[in-house]
């Protein structure tokens, strides 16, 4: 069971995955990896609120997806941790999908499933989980018994949550995620999901906490 409502500060290796803040998207495009999608005014407010949740915590590393919306969110966190050099990693980039550039209505009609029946040259949940785990293991080695923060995208967080909860990482479980008694929402924009590892074993399933500091703004 995922604990909620706080960011853990203990002796484990902690990696907080932050989903980027809300995006300015008046044309309702499923933007995927398209460039130049920046935060909306409410997104900037969200990012500020999330950054304040880290303000008084010790952070040893800060990494971001290469996309603008993540970099803007990460820079708010960096304001309180200027001893860190912000790094980028493609391992936590957005999903590679053929729906990129289509309207959100197309994806909504599929209940957010951008995987079923898709050409195998695009990513499936197992591909996303594989690269997310590669990323987390690298950070676990670099920041053993420390705290790292990474700004990324919703499905990266979701499939790691499923795996950590011993749930199959399938498109079907993405659709019915809120019924699985893990957390009561799809990882919200600017939410913080922290994976805590007690050892350096590569196959360790971490304990997880989820914190949405912007819930009152929704």
Image (cartoon, rainbow, N blue to C red):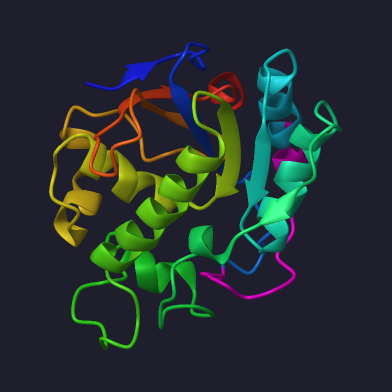
Q: Is residue 152 visible?
A: yes
Is 120 displayed left or right of 38 in the figure? left
Where does the image place residue 83, in percent across and percent down from the top left? 84, 32
Residue range corresponding to the magenta coloring: 29-45
37 in magenta: yes
Is 19 displayed left or right of 60 in the figure? left
Q: Quadrant of residue 205?
A: top left
Is 119 displayed left or right of 13 in the figure? left
Indicate whether 96 appears above or below 173. below
Residue sitting at 66 percent across and 19 percent down? 53
Residue sitting at 66 percent across and 37 percent down? 61
Magenta stretch secondary structure, dominant: loop
Residue sitting at 42 percent across and 25 percent down? 210
Q: Quadrant of residue 107?
A: bottom left
Q: Is residue 110 visible?
A: no
- Count of numbered circles in the view: 0
Where does the image place residue 187, in percent across and percent down from the top left? 42, 39
Q: Quadrant of residue 2?
A: top left
Indicate whether 151 appears above or below 25. above
Instruction: Please tell me which residue lies in front, 78 or 154.
Output: 78
Quarter of the image for the C terminus: give it.
Answer: top right
Residue sitting at 57 percent across and 19 percent down? 216
Quarter of the image for the N terminus: give it.
Answer: top left
Where does the image place residue 75, in percent across and percent down from the top left? 79, 43
């Amino acid at each position: 069971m995922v604990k909620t409502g706080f960011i853990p500060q203990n002796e484990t290796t902690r990696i907080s995955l932050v989903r980027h803040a809300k995006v300015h998207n008046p044309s309702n495009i499923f933007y995927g990896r398209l460039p130049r999608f920046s935060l909306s005014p409410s997104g900037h407010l969200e990012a500020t609120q999330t950054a304040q949740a880290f303000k008084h915590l010790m952070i040893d590393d800060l990494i971001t997806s290469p996309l603008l919306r993540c970099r803007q969110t990460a820079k708010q966190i960096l304001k309180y941790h200027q001893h860190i050099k912000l790094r980028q990693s493609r391992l936590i980039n957005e999903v590679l999908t053929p729906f990129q550039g289509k309207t959100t209505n197309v994806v909504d009609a599929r209940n957010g499933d951008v995987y079923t029946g898709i050409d195998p040259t695009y990513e499936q949940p197992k591909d996303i989980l594989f690269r997310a785990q590669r990323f987390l293991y690298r950070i676990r080695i670099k920041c053993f018994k420390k705290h790292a923060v990474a700004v990324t995208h919703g499905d990266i967080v979701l499939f790691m949550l499923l795996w950590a909860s011993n749930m199959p990482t399938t498109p079907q479980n993405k659709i019915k995620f809120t019924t699985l008694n893990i957390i009561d929402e799809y990882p919200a924009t600017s939410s913080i999901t922290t994976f805590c590892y007690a050892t350096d074993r590569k196959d360790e399933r971490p304990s997880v906490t989820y914190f949405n500091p912007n819930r009152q703004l929704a």
